[in-house]
Image (cartoon, helix red, strand yellow):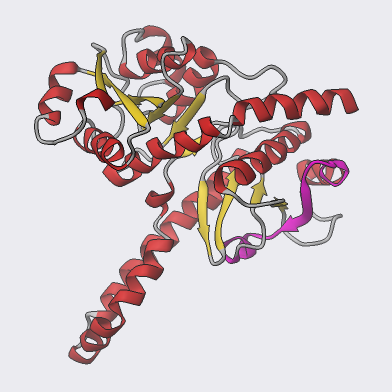
Amino acid sequence: MTNVALDAMGGDNAPGEIVKGAVDAVNENPDVKVLLVGLSDRINEELKNYTYNKEQIEVVHASEQIEMAEPPVMAVRRKKDSSMVVALKLVKDGVADAFVSAGNSGAVLAGGQGIVGRIKGVERPPLAPIIPTEKGVSLLVDCGANVDARPSHLVQFARMGSIYMEKVVGIKNPRVAIVNIGAEEEKGNGLVKETFPLLKECKDINFIGSIEAREIPHGYADVIVCDAFVGNVILKLYEGLSSTLIHVIKEGLLSSLMSKIGAALALPALKKTLKAFDASQYGGAPLLGLKGLVVKTHGSAKAIEVKNSILQCIAFKEQDINGKITEMLTIGNVEE
């Protein structure tokens, strides 16, 4: 059984969509138990609307909640009985295997590192979301945790990302690329130029060189490495462009009688295609390199994304990703 501590009060749609996501997760998979952390009265009121295995959901009371606009570090320090802090402590104490939240991103990052703690040897834990591509999915690492990164950080991102993609997603010998403004090795800013030769020297990853932003949606690489500033810009543009294209396509299909007839014929194939580019089906972004799994979902997450974020924790535990990261760092230190 994988035990997941879920921040029931975090996010724009809490606790309704969060609780629904928890119920959907346990109804879909008997091997997960969700600890719903937050205001017990409100959580129990939501749970009355659903049928589920009572042994797979437990309510853990927390009297406070961290708001989206609060200063992250201060909020984590001051609100000791917040749903986020209480849930993170469940992971630290070994009661839960993983933590999932749609709440304040900065607080998740601060709490993850400050409460759960880093694996020994990990310099900077990165946020690593799965993004859809023409050929399947890719891992974007880092997308929001380390705006000012060093070359050694990016090398660790690449190595941890490779482990995640191979063991959790199931991609053998994943292709690793660093985000750049051209394919040539001599191009890029100082960070990219310093990191490139270090990645070439890594024997435990399949480094294929640089990747330009336009190549990312085509799936030319499985692990896409960059600092958090670049990664967050890529992620937000990706999400904005996807939603805009879906909106424009729908408007076009409904613009005339003939287009509506064509839309009716094309609807099954269109739905399948659009679903592949729906980021919510891939769950949240794990914060790699911590002693326990911390997953951040979108602040606007609905039940389906919450459910998938919970379920992705099962593979993370079963494949012992933290153990493999620790082993990787040990081997790397011996080689050095």
Residue sitting at the far bottom: 258
Say whether residue 336 is visible. Answer: no
Vertical side of 223 occupied by 120: above or below = above
Q: Which residues are magenta?
A: 199-218
At horizontal 66% and vertical 62% (from top left) the residue drawn is: 220
* In front of the other: 266 or 55: 55
Vertical side of 163 occupied by 114: above or below = above
- Rendered location of residue 3, percent (x, y): 39, 24
Looking at the rendered structure, the number of numbered marks drawn on it comes to: 0
- Rendered location of residue 322, percent (x, y): 61, 26
At horizontal 46% and vertical 34% (from top left) the residue drawn is: 313
* In front of the other: 113 or 72: 113
To which quarter of the image does residue 125 belong? Answer: top right
- Rendered location of residue 297, percent (x, y): 40, 38
- Rendered location of residue 58, percent (x, y): 25, 20
At horizontal 50% and vertical 37% (from top left) the residue drawn is: 315
Q: Is residue 209 magenta?
A: yes
- Taking the image as shown, residue 18 lies to the left or right of residue 287, namely left
Say whether residue 224 is visible. Answer: yes
Quarter of the image with the N terminus in it: top left
Q: Is residue 160 magenta?
A: no
- Taking the image as shown, residue 234 lies to the left or right of residue 49, namely right
Quarter of the image with the C terminus in it: top right
Vertical side of 262 occupied by 323: above or below = above
- Taking the image as shown, residue 52 lies to the left or right of residue 82, namely left
